[in-house]
Image (cartoon, rainbow, N blue to C red):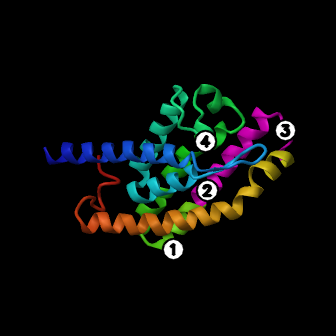
Amino acid sequence: MFQSRNQLKMWILSALFAAIIGILAQVTIPLPLVPITGQTLAVGLAATILGSRYGSLSVILYAFIGAVGIPVFSGMSGGFGVIVGPTGGYIIGFIPAAFLTGFILEKTSFTVIKGMIANTTGMLVTLAIGSAWLKFAADMTWQAAFSSGFLPFIVVGLIKAFLASWIGITVYKRLVSAKLLSSSQQVSS
């Protein structure tokens, strides 16, 4: 009984973070090809707080909700066309990024420094997958995809990685101390 209640709580938290990702995706700084959005910050928060399994679940849920047409992607967009379009690789890249970020924290420790390492790694995974996708979806050269889909986002990505680490670890520790989340919940089923 306790196990199923615990799992239900984690599923609810995953759904909540899918909504948070959708909300922060609307915080947008438009750029010509790929906008700077708050969704990457939200993905980092989900992975930092919920861990690899449930952080990834929240991102998968977010991507699914957007793919079926609910306007949760940046600029209140949605639909499968966004997923297969030039920026779709970033959305797909959020899934392994969330898993890897949570996994690194679970295998090391939930500190801001480890969180920064984990979130920076996740950010680089997202940018690499997104840039590769951009190259093919927009029929660009590798150099053009790298210079327009990777390089411009490194500095702001590092800032978001720090924020996700600092805020995420703080929230995680408070949830654990309030017994609303246990440190073993991220990896248990």
Q: CA distance from mark 3 to mark 1?
A: 36 Å
Residue type for callout 2: Met
**Residue 55 shown left or right of residue 186 in the figure:** right
Name the spot of residue 134 as percent of width and height, x first: 74, 39
In the figure, 101 relative to 159: above or below?
Answer: above
Reply yes or no: does residue 141 show up in magenta: yes
Dot 2 or dot 4, earlier in sequence = 4
Q: Which residue is mark 4?
A: 74
Of 104 and 26, nearer the camera is: 26
In the image, the segment drawn in magenta is 121-142
In the figure, 145 relative to 164: above or below?
Answer: above
Q: Which residue is mark 1?
A: 113
Residue type for callout 3: Met
Q: Where residue 123 is drawn, which disc sits there?
A: 2
Name the spot of residue 29 as percent of width and height, x first: 68, 51
In the figure, 110 relative to 144: above or below?
Answer: below
Q: Which residue is mark 3?
A: 140
Q: Residues within 10 Å of mark 2 (few under 14, many from 20)?
A: many
Residue sitting at x 53%, y 37%: 72
Q: Main secondary structure of the magenta part?
A: helix
Q: CA distance from mark 3 to mark 4?
A: 22 Å
Reply yes or no: does residue 125 show up in magenta: yes
Residue sitting at x 49%, y 32%: 64
Label 2 close to label 4 by CB (< 8 Å): no
Residue 108, quarter of the rendered image: bottom left
Residue type for callout 1: Ile
